[in-house]
Amino acid sequence: MATTNEPLVERHTVKERVVHWAIAIVFLFLFLSGLAMFHPIFFWISALFGGGQFMRWLHPLVGVLLAILYAAGLVRDNRWLPADQAWQKNMWAYMKKEYHPTDTGKYNAGQKLMYWSMVPIIAVLAVTGIVMWQPWFAPIFPATGRRLAGLLHAIGAFIMFVGIGIHVYAAYWTRGSIRAMVRGTVSSNWARFHHPAWFRQITGKGP
């Protein structure tokens, strides 16, 4: 834990934090509005978003926004590197704090796996969402295709919900991560311990 006199380093720029929290807000809206449309028992949620008609109109537009935001500037820092193989190989030992990597970049392999696992899920949600998009695209497709798209859309949404839950838990489990995404900075010791290769890159310190 950082002391009051411990030097801080910038972990996330303002742009990165804005994109991250925008994705979080967009995801929350999509999850709640999708839940409201999934089953009548949840339809009361639509009142939070101006009623069912407006919510149905807004949901697909916000879905497009999610796809754009997710790709905005995140691919570069999530490129898979040779050093990530060691983290992946020792993933369970890392979770039990029996293994600590020395070549972790800005994001570790677990964070990268989380990012890339969401890419195909968002793609499935986008394609199936277009098939169901009323009144623009849905009439083009047969009823069987729309029903299949609805099933795949629900499955994809559930998988994404689980994935985001894991992401939130991991952020809570790694002390200092949430603070970094709120304030943008971490202590030098935190950076050196959790992301040593990234710390060496931004400071020029260490081998």
Image (tube, grey):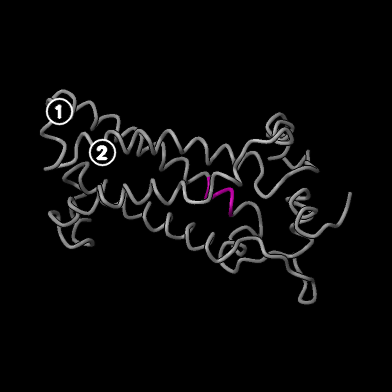
Q: Mark 1 packing: few (<14 Cα in 10 Å), some, or many (20+)?
A: few
Query: As drawn, which residue projects farthest toward the top?
Result: 144
Q: Quadrant of residue 152?
A: top left
Residue name at image x 33 percent, y 32 percent: 155
Which amino acid is tagged 1?
Answer: Phe
**Is residue 72 toward the left or the right of residue 101 in the image?**
left
Residue name at image x 48 percent, y 63 percent: 18
Q: Please tell me which residue lies in front, 92 or 49.
A: 49
**Could you say where residue 97 lies in the image, as x and y percent from the top left?**
75, 42
Name the image quarter holding the N terminus: bottom right
Q: Which residue lies under the disc numbered 1?
A: 141
Q: Is residue 120 above or below residue 76?
A: above
Which amino acid is tagged 2?
Answer: Gly
**Does the magenta segment cover residue 183?**
no
Q: Which residues are magenta?
A: 167-171
**Is residue 20 toward the left or the right of residue 45 in the image?**
right
